[in-house]
Image: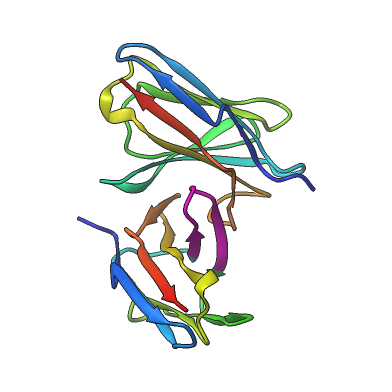
Amino acid sequence: KNEVEQSPQNLTAQEGEFITINCSYSVGISALHWLQQHPGGGIVSLFMLSSGKKKHGRLIATINIQEKHSSLHITASHPRDSAVYICAVHSRNQFYFGTGTSLTVIP
Amino acid sequence: KAGVTQTPRYLIKTRGQQVTLSCSPISGHRSVSWYQQTPGQGLQFLFEYFSETQRNKGNFPGRFSGRQFSNSRSEMNVSTLELGDSALYLCASSPLGNGDTQYFGPGTRLTVL
């Protein structure tokens, strides 16, 4: 049983396109995180959400607590956005992770 | 501030051996968490330490253990290594833990032969 489901698994986009990655979870959470992992392994935390919406540059993250769903949007995508994006939820005193969305942005 | 550091970065061991990995958190961060990442299982939570105490533990066998020192540095140990323990082991620190933003280290790539 997966506590966190992400879609799509793989995504290829042209530079400049609007991108949406979805995350659904099945447990009660205290927070939801979006992470970015570049080739080579380094992970960076993009957002931590417990309600509503957050924006940082071209990235927007939203969460709907009632529907247990979150989305990560990238506006005006750029090749440097190519990475794996991972959704993580904090529940029952630990983190549960989605399997990640591999994004490739083509110039 | 310096980021989270992990040593060593790469490690090759054989089955049955044990290994110790080290993590130095960002200065002032009291929570250190450990994660295992494999192609098959993705990222999985191992355990979290806060003020030298294990606060939470994921679903891993007792061969995986850890500790935290008074300066918040942490070590994790895996005994009786199995082939399936080959993975990227990531450490992350945060000021107070408990779901707070995690600051990840570069990871230790462990290969078990």
Percent coordinates x, y for residue A2 in the rendering: 24, 57
Q: Quadrant of residue A13?
A: bottom left
Percent coordinates x, y for residue A102 in the rendering: 36, 65
Residue A65 visible, this orientation: no
- Residue A42 to residue B49: above or below: below
Closer to us: B24 or B10: B10
Farthest residue, direction top: B17
Q: Quadrant of residue A53?
A: bottom right
- Residue B97 to residue A3: above or below: above
Residue A1 visible, this orientation: yes
First to last magenta residue range: A34-47
- Residue A63 to residue B100: above or below: below
- Left or right, residue B77 beside residue A3: right
Farthest residue, direction front: A107
- Residue A74 to residue B47: above or below: below
Residue A58 located within the stretch drawn in magenta: no
Percent coordinates x, y for residue B5 in the rendering: 65, 37
- Please report the residue visible at 67 percent of the width from the left and 39 percent of the height from the top: B25
Percent coordinates x, y for residue A45 in the rendering: 56, 61
Magenta: main secondary structure equals strand
- Please report the residue visible at 30 percent of the width from the left and 46 percent of the height from the top: B39
Closer to us: B85 or A90: B85
- Left or right, residue B42 beside residue B65: left
Q: Quadrant of the C terminus of chain B?
A: top left
